[in-house]
Image: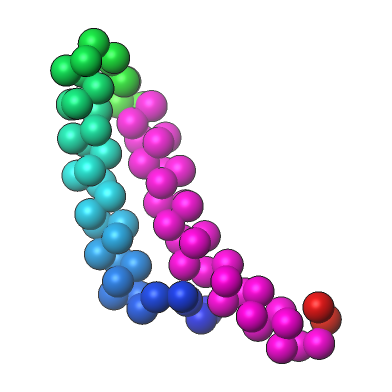
Amino acid sequence: MELRISKGALLVLVAVSIPFLVEFRTVLAFFGVDLSIPATIGLGALVVAAIVAWAALPALRRNFGKSGLA
């Protein structure tokens, strides 16, 4: 699968997003918004899926156009 960024950069983005989400939960708690652990896991899954989609979809669109089907 061809990606917009390298696989190493994708791994770094996913790895950095996990502590960011944990700290985001802490910041929300500071302002009185309680985010449960399952909600944090769900939000994390959405963020990781969005990062992977961002990295993969433009490459898929380019490959689709090259096949003459677009």
The overriding secondary structure of the stretch rendered in magenta is helix
Q: Residue at x 81, y 87 (%)?
A: 68
Front residue (pair 41, 2): 2
Q: Residue at x 25, y 64 (%)?
A: 12
Please provide percent x and percent y for residue 44: 36, 41
Please provide percent x and percent y for residue 63: 65, 83
Q: Is residue 66 above or below residue 28?
A: below
Q: Is residue 36 above or below residue 21?
A: above
Residue 26 is left or right of residue 7, and the answer is left
Residues shaded magenta:
39-68
Residue 59, picture quadrant: bottom right
Residue 43 part of the magenta segment? yes
Please provide percent x and percent y for residue 48: 40, 51
Which quadrant: the C terminus?
A: bottom right
Please provide percent x and percent y for residue 56: 52, 69
Residue 59 part of the magenta segment? yes
Q: Residue at x 31, y 57 (%)?
A: 14
Residue 62 is left or right of residue 10, and the answer is right
Q: Is residue 29 above or below residue 39?
A: above
